[in-house]
Structures are given as C-alpha cells and as structure tokens.
Image: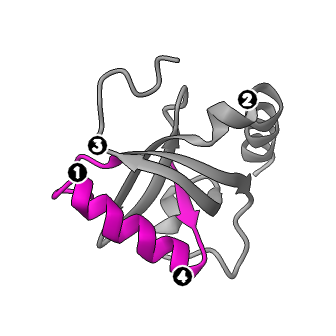
Amino acid sequence: MKIVAALLGTMIASSSAAEASRGHLYVGPENEAFYPCGSKTGYWFLAPKKVRNLLISEGLKKSSALSEHGVFVELDGELGRKTKTTDGEFISAYPAFFHIKKVASIREVSPSDCSR
C-alpha cells in the first residue's frame, strides 16, 4: 500500500493538470477505466451519475465497442485512493480511482491522441 501511495504521489506531482486529464476511457460490464496520457496504468473511474451517463452515451456514439477500443477524453478530475466504499470485485484490480468531475470532450481514438 505504501508503494501505491508513493506512486500516486509521484504521478500527481510530476503530471500537469492537462496531462492528468487527457487519456483513454473504457467502459464495459467489468471495466470502467481511465488511462491517462503518458501512463500505462489504468484507474477505475468514479463520476456523478449524470456525468457517467454522458460518458457512456456519448462514448457509444464514438465507439461501438467502448469496452475494447475506448474513446479519447479530456476531463476535469483527480486521482484518489480507494476506500472500503470504493472497493469492489472489479475495482480491486486497479491501484486507485480517477474521480471525474466534468467532461470537456469525447472523441474517437486516434494514434496521435497523447502526442501533444
């Protein structure tokens, strides 16, 4: 657990807000994950119901296989530690969660998504 906390602290300290809020989002029966640009680590995402519904409905318009191909998103959010209330069978595979507050944009995945 100390390693996860140290890694989270390093990522938060070394990432700008723009880097932390851009990435790929995947949603499926056992997967609700956000992979920030520049990171190979995915984070289970949490969002208010209205924001989550927007992500899913708009995401499905951009990618018919949202769980496999995902979508590129720009978000206002932050990393957070898991707690007993955020832990569950599928979330346990992720080191932390990403709390999404607001969605700036959603589009199809492109090879140049994280290049800027």
Asked if disc 4 and disc 1 are in contact, CB closer than 8 Å, the reply is no
Q: Residue 62 colored magenta? A: yes
Asked if disc 3 and disc 4 are in contact, CB closer than 8 Å, the reply is no
Amino acid identity at mark 4: Lys
Looking at this rendering, what residue extends furthest in the left direction?
64
Label 2 and label 3: CA atoms lie apart by 24 Å
Q: Which residue is mark 1?
A: 68
Q: Is residue 81 left or right of residue 105?
A: right
SS label for mark 3:
loop
Q: Which residue is mark 3?
A: 108
Q: Is residue 115 above or below residue 69?
A: above
Along the line of sight, the residue nearer the viewer: 44 or 18: 18
**Which mark sits nearer the N-terminus, 3 or 4?**
4
Q: Which residue is mark 4?
A: 49
Amino acid identity at mark 3: Glu
SS label for mark 1:
loop
Single out the mark in the foreground, 2 or 3: 3
Q: Is residue 99 above or below residue 5?
A: below
Numbered tag placed on residue 15 in the rendering: 2
Residue 25 in percent (x, y) is at 41, 51
